[in-house]
Image: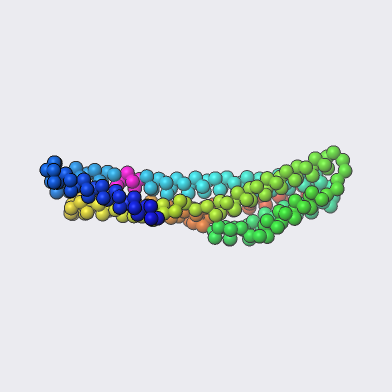
Amino acid sequence: MLVCVLAMAAAIGVVATAAFLFRRLGNGTDDLVPDGPSASHAGSMLSSLFLLVFAIAIVVPWTTADAARQNTYAESQAAVETYWAAARLPAPAGAQVQQQVRDYVGTVLDKDWPLMAAGRLSLEGASRLDALRTQVAGLTVKGDDAKDAKTQVLDEVKALSQARRQREADARSTPPAGVLPLTILTGSIVLVFPFLAGARPRGRTLVPLLVMAALLGFGVYLTWQISHVFASGLSVGPDAFRAALTEFQRIPWGV
């Protein structure tokens, strides 16, 4: 923070020094009009800065949310594949593993999702996965088909655990610090810049400014809405896991 303040102070000092030196040397002419070169240059640079910050504030969270959404489908698909593979295990292990997978998905929906808005997952979900892996690893099976099924189940449980860890990282992810406040600050400066430059728009000339203000306000609102992957109006939902529960209905029960 101190470095940021020093950088801003240095930049302001450069402008003040340049203004003083050029006035003392008698170079240039006074620029007092709202549409003069100084105001035009500052206005274009402020607009560019706002667009840069706004793009970061939108693109980064949107990309993170899209990746998080894809990961939920990867995790749910791993659960479905585990359920399918468990059907090949000998009884009663197959049905028991399938029930554990079903219980895990239910835990994700009932326990994990309410907590993910706060950036964390439930301990119960991790415990269920650990118990599932321990149970499958401890199975004693005979025959090539049963051994292949056990190996496949363990592989899918591993993929399920990896996807869960990624979902936990997604839940904790936040936009770069200061991006949202900087978006609001630069947007506000862009709005009042014509007045700061000395212009006094009236009548119909106010209409474009009002339209711009409305659009900037909507943009800031959108930025705030997508600032957290699992806790906003545009957050990632648990649709993938609900679809997995539906998919379980058509998969044969453990033999």
x and y percentages locating residue 81 in the rendered image? 71, 44
Outermost residue toward the top? 144
x and y percentages locating residue 18 in the rendered image? 21, 45
Nearer the observer, 197 or 16: 16
The quadrant of the picture occupied by the N terminus is bottom left
In the rendered view, does 240 fall on the left or right side of 224? right
In the rendered view, does 74 fall on the left or right side of 222? right
| Residue at screen point 41% across, 52% down | 179
| Residue at screen point 38% across, 52% down | 3
x and y percentages locating residue 223 in the rendered image? 42, 52
Dominant secondary structure of the residues highlighted in magenta in the image: helix
Which span is picked out in magenta?
Answer: 46-51
Nearer the observer, 155 or 13: 13
Q: Is residue 110 visible?
A: no
| Residue at screen point 71% across, 53% down | 129
In the rendered view, does 42 fall on the left or right side of 228? left
In the rendered view, does 46 fall on the left or right side of 27? right
Nearer the observer, 57 or 238: 57
x and y percentages locating residue 147 in the rendered image? 82, 42
Q: How many marks?
A: 0
- Residue 33 included in the magenta stretch of the image: no
